[in-house]
């Protein structure tokens, strides 16, 4: 089974309620991660504000931050390789990458409002 | 003192800054020790003078107090705890990640929540059985964690795999990622807090309406999570004798006495049923062991020595500040300070004075008591008054989030989201959002607000650009030149922040912290206002004269160290309701004259 790693921007809450407007994409993504885990997938999430060491310790992520800055997060790695950056993946994408059966194809597309909340 | 009877092992004192929690905690510890109990006193007061009181350097380790047998003490500095905590998370990546990234992370961890959680982390170990504490029969804390913190720690969802696995996506509890202890230890600490057999919570308040309202809120919040055996202490009451004897000579003392008694008579329902102790204002300073030993003694037992009259300090008044504000013709004026310092009244005074000078003003207030806004509405040609209800705004925001974003979450996720929405930040953001609709008017008239967002909130909003985007959306795209709210707040020509405080040690310290927080966001407070000054009111009663004399050092402190410019407002005999009395407040020479 492949491993999906998500490097979140510095969020004080993963639900992002402390932002001016709560980011629907973020809340949806949190739900999608739960779903994928329930399917037995290996999904790890790292919050820049909580585990910066995970960012610094991964050459791919560190290089990404140096090039593009924290503003360009989130960064999604599939087995250590960049799969996506700048937005959260939709449930269909997660399912495809991890070879899961996407039982709920109605997941809305992430909107353009970016990823950061607080 | 009822709260001292059958005291369980842990005692927490809670209440807003400056009500005397630390003094009462010290006096409690001394009292217990004198009765032969082995006591540990834990102070988190940033202005802690516990070491001074006992004549020992204490600091962040348990230190025996030679002058008081059976007593040891420990000082926890919440700011230092928060800094240590930030260093633990950020330190290892400094130099490894780009500076801008590191700075962003530090800001995330610079809020009030982090400070509170870090302080809680520090004293968690004292609440569970350990070799550190088993010697002590009582542990006395001069502070208590908020309901929000305790509720977060109680939520199973917040913890799922969090500390154990070292990863996860828990929410506001994010700050807990940097904590070192095991979840079981936090659970034991929270259990101890909620157990009436082991813990007593004592609310400390002054006999002032606003303060009592706030304490009632704390009471309800903590009672709702099972901490329901609470006690109440009303501190610093003006004794009846002082008012009776002094009535002829000091109408101010009589007025304060009447106001305090009225506030007590109108005590919020939740508080009225609590076992309550009253501690009279003392005719001596609460410094030193002897003074603290007498804190719980009846008022008439205490020796009184006469205090020479204090001549009111020659300090500027609000009229002087308004001169500077009026010169620009328009702009945003925000009053900032802790609850109960009189922000709303001062905002009204500034607005009324501007309007009286023929300038167009919009006064907007979040004061839960609507009477002020109501009495001013329509009273002056140039004055518009509007009111924002913080509870309603917060509820609307909460409901919006739960209906939209919360709809798809499972029960645990939803519980976590709901708790996130109860954080103090949520209210601050909801209220500020409501205000920001009005702020735009400040380009053509004066807008006076009785609240302001903290620098921390502004930085977070600005750093992520969320606020910026929101404004872009509101303004419509295609506008090339515009000012973001952050830029507007940073520009002293457009925005003047007035910091409101009282002439007492802790309130001044708290105000200085607010100022430092705003400065981090690039906002320089324009002036300070010292409200309710007894010294400025020229009291005649001995008790009030002593308070007046104590104020002088703090006034000097504000003038010399903290404020670019400042104004001093006397404690008034009458509530400044209505245009006439507000105007009196603006000019020192007119204050307290007339009936």
Image (cartoon, coloured by chain):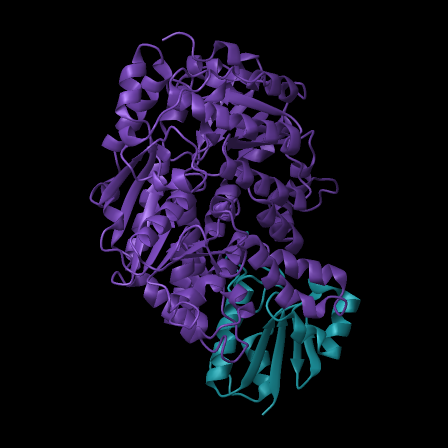
Chain colours: A cyan, B purple
x and y, in percent, of residue B476 in the image = 64, 45
Residue B224 at x, y = what percent?
A: 29, 56
In the rendered image of this protein, does residue A103 appear above or below residue B24?
Answer: below
**Which residue is at 71% across, 73% downward?**
A56
Out of B84 and B403, give the one closest to the viewer: B84
Question: In the rendered view, does B125 fall on the left or right side of B358?
Answer: left
Whether residue B417 is visible, yes or no, is yes
Of A106 and B261, nearer the camera is B261
Quarter occupied by residue B213? top left
Quarter occupied by the C terminus of chain B? top left
State left or right for residue A29 relative to residue B141.
Answer: right
In the image, A13 versus B473, the foreground residue is A13
Question: Residue at image x 45%, y 76%?
Answer: B160
The single residue placed furthest to the left in the displayed view is B273
Q: Is B244 placed above or below A108 here?
A: above
The x and y percentages for residue A83 are 68, 79
The image shows a total of numbered marks equal to: 0
| Residue in the image at 48% along x and 86% along y | A39
Q: Which image quadrant for residue B452? A: top right
Q: Quadrant of residue B250?
A: top left
Please provide percent x and percent y for residue B146. 41, 54
Q: Residue at x 49, y 83 (%)?
A: A37
Reply above or below: B173 against B222: below
Describe residue A72's horizontal placement relative to residue B117 as left or right: right
Q: Nearer the viewer, residue B418 or B305?
A: B305
Horizontal relation, residue B419 to residue A74: left or right: left
Quadrant holding the N terminus of chain B: top left
Q: Which residue lies furthest to the bottom in this view?
A: A1
**Please, which residue is most extreme toward the right here?**
A67
């Amino acid at each position: 089974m492949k491993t999906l790693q998500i490097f979140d921007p510095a969020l004080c809450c993963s639900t992002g309620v402390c932002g001016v407007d709560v980011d629907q994409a973020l809340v949806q993504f949190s739900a999608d991660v739960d779903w994928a885990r329930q399917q037995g997938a290996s999904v790890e999430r790292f919050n820049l504000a909580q585990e910066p060491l995970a960012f610094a310790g991964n050459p791919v992520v560190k290089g990404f931050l140096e090039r593009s800055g924290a503003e360009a997060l989130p960064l999604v790695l599939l087995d250590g390789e960049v799969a996506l950056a700048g937005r959260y993946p939709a449930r269909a994408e997660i399912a495809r990458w991890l070879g899961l059966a996407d039982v709920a194809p109605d997941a809305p597309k992430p909107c353009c409002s970016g990823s950061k909340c607080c | 003192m009822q709260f001292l009877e059958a005291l369980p092992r842990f005692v927490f004192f809670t209440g807003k800054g400056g009500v005397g929690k630390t003094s009462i905690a010290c006096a409690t510890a001394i009292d217990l020790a004198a009765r032969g109990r082995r006591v540990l006193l834990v102070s988190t007061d940033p202005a802690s003078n516990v070491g001074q009181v006992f004549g020992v350097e204490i600091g962040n380790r348990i230190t025996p107090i030679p002058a008081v047998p059976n007593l040891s003490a420990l000082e926890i500095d919440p700011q230092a705890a928060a800094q240590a905590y930030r260093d633990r998370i950020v330190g290892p990546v400094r130099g490894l990640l780009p500076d801008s990234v590191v700075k962003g992370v530090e800001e995330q961890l610079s809020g009030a929540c982090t400070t509170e959680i870090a302080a809680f982390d520090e004293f968690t170990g004292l609440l569970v059985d350990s070799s550190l504490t088993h010697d002590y029969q009582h542990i006395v804390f001069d502070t208590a964690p908020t309901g929000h913190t305790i509720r977060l720690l109680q939520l199973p969802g917040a913890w799922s795999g969090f500390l154990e696995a070292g990863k996860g996506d828990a929410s506001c509890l994010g700050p807990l990622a940097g904590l070192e202890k095991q979840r079981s230890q936090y659970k034991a600490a929270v259990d101890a807090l909620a157990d009436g057999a082991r813990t007593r919570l004592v609310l400390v308040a002054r006999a002032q309406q606003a303060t009592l309202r706030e304490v009632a809120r704390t009471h309800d919040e903590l009672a709702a999570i099972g901490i329901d055996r609470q006690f109440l202490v009303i501190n610093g009451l003006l004794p009846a004798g002082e008012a009776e004897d002094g009535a002829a000579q000091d109408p101010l003392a009589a007025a304060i006495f009447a106001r305090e008694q009225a506030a007590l008579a109108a005590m919020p329902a939740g508080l009225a049923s609590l076992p309550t102790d009253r501690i009279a204002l003392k005719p001596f300073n609460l410094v030193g062991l002897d003074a603290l030993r007498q804190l719980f003694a009846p008022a008439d037992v205490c020796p009184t020595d006469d205090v020479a009259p204090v001549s009111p300090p020659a300090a500027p008044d609000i009229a002087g500040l308004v001169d500077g504000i009026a010169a620009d013709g328009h702009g945003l004026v925000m009053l900032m300070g802790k609850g109960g310092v009189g922000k709303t009244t001062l905002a009204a005074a500034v607005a009324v004075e501007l309007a009286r000078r023929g300038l167009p003003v919009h006064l907007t207030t979040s004061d839960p008591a609507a009477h002020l806004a109501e009495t001013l509405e329509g009273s002056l040609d140039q004055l518009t008054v509007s009111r924002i209800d913080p509870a309603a705004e917060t509820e609307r925001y909460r409901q919006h989030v739960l209906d939209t974003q919360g709809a798809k979450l499972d029960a645990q996720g939803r519980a976590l989201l709901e708790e996130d929405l109860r954080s103090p930040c949520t209210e601050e953001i909801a209220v500020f959002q409501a205000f920001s609709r009005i702020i735009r008017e400040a380009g053509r008239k004066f807008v006076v607000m009785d609240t302001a967002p903290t620098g921390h909130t502004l930085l977070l909003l600005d750093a992520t650009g969320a606020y910026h985007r929101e404004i872009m959306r509101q303004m419509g795209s295609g506008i090339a030149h515009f000012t973001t709210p952050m830029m507007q707040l940073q520009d002293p020509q457009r925005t003047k922040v007035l910091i409101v405080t009282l002439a007492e040690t802790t309130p001044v310290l708290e105000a200085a912290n607010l100022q430092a927080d705003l400065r981090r966001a690039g906002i320089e407070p324009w002036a300070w206002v010292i409200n309710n000054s007894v010294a400025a009111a020229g009291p005649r009663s001995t008790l009030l004269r002593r308070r007046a004399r104590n104020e002088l050092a703090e006034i000097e402190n504000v003038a010399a160290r903290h404020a670019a410019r400042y104004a001093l407002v006397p404690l008034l005999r009458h509530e400044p309701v209505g245009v006439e009395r507000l105007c009196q407040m603006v000019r020192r020479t007119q204050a307290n004259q007339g009936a």
